[in-house]
Amino acid sequence: MSVSEQIEDTEKTIQWAVEHGVDSVVLFPANIRENTLLDILYKEGKYLRICHWAVFEVLIRVPWHYLNRIYLAWYGDWIDYNEEGERENLPPYSCERCAGKWMEFYRHFLEETDNSGRQRILMLYGEELASGCTCRRNFEEDLRVSTREERERRIEDGRKWLSNKQFLQQINI
């Protein structure tokens, strides 16, 4: 899915879940771990790494009165290293300018349990994080990419690619 499709799908899923009686929703931005299907898709250019701004955009779009039901699974030091000190995963990304602020934002968002308090945090950090941030501009460009017309073709291409025997051998199935 494109970035805008990912965000729209997440937003609709949250709304559906809450409207159908779910008490809380947990967002878990994907880490790309070596030797997983997600890793293969990423290396083949069929999956886009998550940007912190995508998580933020979902939170901004969700109705404010749902904010107290949303949690973020596991934030903090998202980078895993092997014994040789080599990186083993790719967590959500940002530019150097705003990288340190993201963990602060996530912590403050989770510490606040009130809807309007969380909404204030979103407004405050939205301005603070965007100030001089290069990844925000790139993220906004990614949002403008319209792929609706080609979605069916991409789905069919994905199905064909996934059913390819070479791919199945690559993941040892």
Image: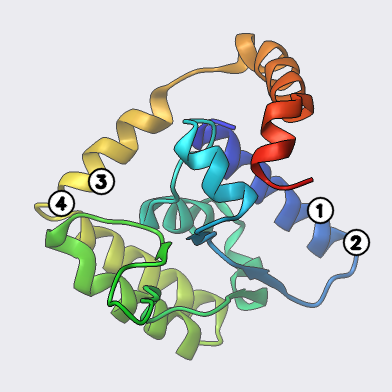
Amino acid bearing label 2: His
* Nearer the camera: disc 4 or disc 1: 4
Query: Residue drawn at (45%, 51%), measured in percent from left and top?
Result: 50
C-alpha separation, residue under disc 1 versus residue under disc 3 = 28 Å
Q: Residues within 10 Å of mark 1 (few under 14, many from 20)?
A: few
How far is mark 4 from mark 1, CA to CA? 33 Å
Q: CA distance from mark 4 to mark 3?
A: 6 Å
- CA–CA distance in space, label 1 to label 2: 6 Å
Residue at the spot 75% in from the left edge and 19% down from the top edge: 160
Tell me which numbered mark, 1 or 3, is placed earlier along the sequence: 1
Q: Can you tell which mark lies on residue 20?
A: 2
User: Residue at coordinates 47% horizontally, 76% vertically from top-left?
Assistant: 118
Q: Quadrant of residue 120?
A: bottom left
Element type at mark 2: loop
Report which quarter residue 109 is drawn in.
bottom left
Q: How is the image coloured?
A: rainbow
Name the mark nearer the viewer: 2 or 4. Answer: 4
Q: Which residue is disc 3 drawn over?
A: 136
Amino acid on which disc 1 is placed: Trp
Residue identified by numbered label 4:
133
Q: Which element type, helix, strand or loop, lies under badge 3? A: helix
Q: Is residue 89 above or below residue 83?
A: above
